[in-house]
Image: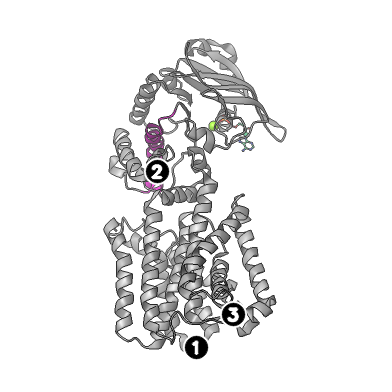
């Protein structure tokens, strides 16, 4: 039996009359990687926002590592082992790259010095050592996305939610990201990764969940969902 | 700048205070320098709150005034020595600031400026109205820290307090709290999502900077010796903000530069009268905002990016 690290049941969220998330049941096991795909506006980011506490659900429950985290402020799930990256990047502009990364260790309880020394190693791993002291707002978009991965290394989460990590990054960086994800997944971290880069994410995942209009349109292995006519239609529509 | 430089600065201030107390400065210069310490404590702590934690509070002069009037109460009514108030008032004002923060920091956005503005306004009205306590515009009289009026004592004390400020600032900025504050300043949502307890960090920043404002107020009361409600005005608040902004908000030595610039100008235009001084300083503040944008330090560091790469922190 694999351990379920994240589970949502009947998750719903509306903004005014716009039903953005319309009843999502989702399970993620330790060491599993689920790709979340779907057209723009499908509700992928909103789904992560609900899990991580940025949005409060109108209905449904969220269990993180067996404990209920529904309706809790975002810092609580984060402290209980949830990591999430943001679609538009999560860097603090005036802080240096190393400080940006060190924060992920500090919220886990490390002192600043220790966190900065671990951050230095994580930056080396993602190839950002030369810009470790640069303020984040002087870095390129791809470099800022790598900051998220260095943070991921420091955060040592049980569950990681990544929102379009590969958008606009070059193949070399995608390979760095792939290696880190694969290594952490194999150590038991559960991943939910949103990506439009299907070859890249299908090469990493065991399962695919296709969202459209806030619902699970299809779920299954990469081959199964690729062959699903409803999925093809949703993507073309 | 290296960590070592940062640690030498407090020593430098203590040494300067000692040295200046020995050379027999002209009273007008000594007074200017001593009161500059009051402004340095205020502009410096406001910079920690606004420039590093991103929390724009207008309560700072109000908190300093509370520290000054609390000092007067403890000395006049309580019979305590002025020295004791220098320890008690920072703690008391930290609690006051914490209480204000509990109300004002709950919600983000205009809440904090509005509530702190209202606090300062209400407090000013109270001071003016409660003339039986505050003695109205006649003011309250306090004894000096030691009998007689020895400016050299205040030069030494000022040097020590300025040094103390830089020690506290180093401890904050180079420690865990400072990094958490700056993360909140740069992006509160992301900091929250990473697990930072936003409210606690803001309250901590609020209380520590309130303590420094309380210390400034207590120092002021013990030095000036006459307290009038005019101590608390939005003009004074603007003055403190101008010092932080002109030097460079979010820079460790921004307020110091701002205090030096503004107090020097004040010294040279002092013959023109107070109303012109304020106009001139407002004009300079506007010019800085227009042309230097992020303050003098940011401007210089852009001219010489390599030499000044480490100025930011
Ligand atoms: N904060 C918000 N307020 C109102 N509507 C929102 C908000 N966030 C997302 N939405 C709406 O939710 C829908 C799904 O958006 P999103 O989750 O960003 O989709 P995706 O990430 O799949 O592209 C869109 O219609 C969007 O307009
Ligand atoms: Mg999205």
Closer-to-camera residue (B264/B159) = B159
| Local SS, label 3 | loop
Q: Decide: is B5 above or below A17.
A: below
| Local SS, label 2 | helix
What is the count of numbered marks?
Answer: 3
Closer-to-camera residue (A48/A222) = A48
Residue picked out by circle 2: A100
Same chain for labels 3 and 1? Say yes or no.
Answer: yes
The segment highlighted magenta reads: A135-157
Earlier in the chain: of badge 3 and badge 1, it is 3
Is residue B200 rendered to the left or right of residue B114?
Answer: left
Q: Residue furthest right?
A: A17
Whereabouts is ligand 2, in terms of quadrant? top right
- Mark 2 vs ligand 2: CB below 8 Å: no
Q: Residues within 10 Å of mark 3 (few under 14, many from 20)?
A: some
Say which quarter of the image contains residue B293. Answer: bottom left
| Local SS, label 1 | helix
Task: Name the disc covering residue B228, or none.
Answer: 3
* Residue B287 in view here: no
């Amino acid at each position: 039996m694999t351990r379920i690290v994240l589970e949502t049941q009947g998750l719903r969220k509306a903004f005014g009359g716009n039903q953005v998330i319309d009843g999502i049941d989702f399970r993620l096991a330790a060491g599993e990687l689920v790709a979340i795909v779907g057209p723009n506006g499908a509700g992928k980011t909103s789904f992560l926002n609900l899990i991580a506490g940025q949005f409060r659900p109108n209905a449904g429950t969220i269990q993180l590592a067996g404990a209920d985290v529904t309706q809790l402020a975002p810092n609580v799930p984060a402290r209980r082992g949830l990591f999430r990256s943001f679609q538009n990047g999560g860097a603090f502009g005036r802080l240096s790259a190393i400080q940006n990364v060190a924060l992920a260790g500090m919220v886990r309880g490390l002192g600043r010095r220790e966190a900065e020394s671990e951050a230095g190693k994580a930056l080396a791993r993602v190839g950002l050592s030369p810009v470790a002291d640069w303020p984040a707002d002087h870095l390129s978009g791809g470099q800022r996305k790598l900051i998220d991965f260095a943070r991921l290394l420091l955060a040592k989460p049980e569950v990681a939610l990544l929102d379009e990590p590969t958008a606009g990054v070059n193949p070399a960086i995608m390979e760095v990201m792939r290696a880190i994800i694969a290594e952490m997944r194999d150590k038991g971290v559960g991943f939910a990764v949103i990506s439009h880069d299907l070859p890249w994410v299908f090469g990493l995942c065991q399962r695919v969940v296709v969202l459209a209009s806030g619902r699970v349109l299809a779920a299954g292995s990469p081959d199964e969902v690729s062959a699903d006519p409803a999925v093809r239609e949703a993507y073309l529509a | 700048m290296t960590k070592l430089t940062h640690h030498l600065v407090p020593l430098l201030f203590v040494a300067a205070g000692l040295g200046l107390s020995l050379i027999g400065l002209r009273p007008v210069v000594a007074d200017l320098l001593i009161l500059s310490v009051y402004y340095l404590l205020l502009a410096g702590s406001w910079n920690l709150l606004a420039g590093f934690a991103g929390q724009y509070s207008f309560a700072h002069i109000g908190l300093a005034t509370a520290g000054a009037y609390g000092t007067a109460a403890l000395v006049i009514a309580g019979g305590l020595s002025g020295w004791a108030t220098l320890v008690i008032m920072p703690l008391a004002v930290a609690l006051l600031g914490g209480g204000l923060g509990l109300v004002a920091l709950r919600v983000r956005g205009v809440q904090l400026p509005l509530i702190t503005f209202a606090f300062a306004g209400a407090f000013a009205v109270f001071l003016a109205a409660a003339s039986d306590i505050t003695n109205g515009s006649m003011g309250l009289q306090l004894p000096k820290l030691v009998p007689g009026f020895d400016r050299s004592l205040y030069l030494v004390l000022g040097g020590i307090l300025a040094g103390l400020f830089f020690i506290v600032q180093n401890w904050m900025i180079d420690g865990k709290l400072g990094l958490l504050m700056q993360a909140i300043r740069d992006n509160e949502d992301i900091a929250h999502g990473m697990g930072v307890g936003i409210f606690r960090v803001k309250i901590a920043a609020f209380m520590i900077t309130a303590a420094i404002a309380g210390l400034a107020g207590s120092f002021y009361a013990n030095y000036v010796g006459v307290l009038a409600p005019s101590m608390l005005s939005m003009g004074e608040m603007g003055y403190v903000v101008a010092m932080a902004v002109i030097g460079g908000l979010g820079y460790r030595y921004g307020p110091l530069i701002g205090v030096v610039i503004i107090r020097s100008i004040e010294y040279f235009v002092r013959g023109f009268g107070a109303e012109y001084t304020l106009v001139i300083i407002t004009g300079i503040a506007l010019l800085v905002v227009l042309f230097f944008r992020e303050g003098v330090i940011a401007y210089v560091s852009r001219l010489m990016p390599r030499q000044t790469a480490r100025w930011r922190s």
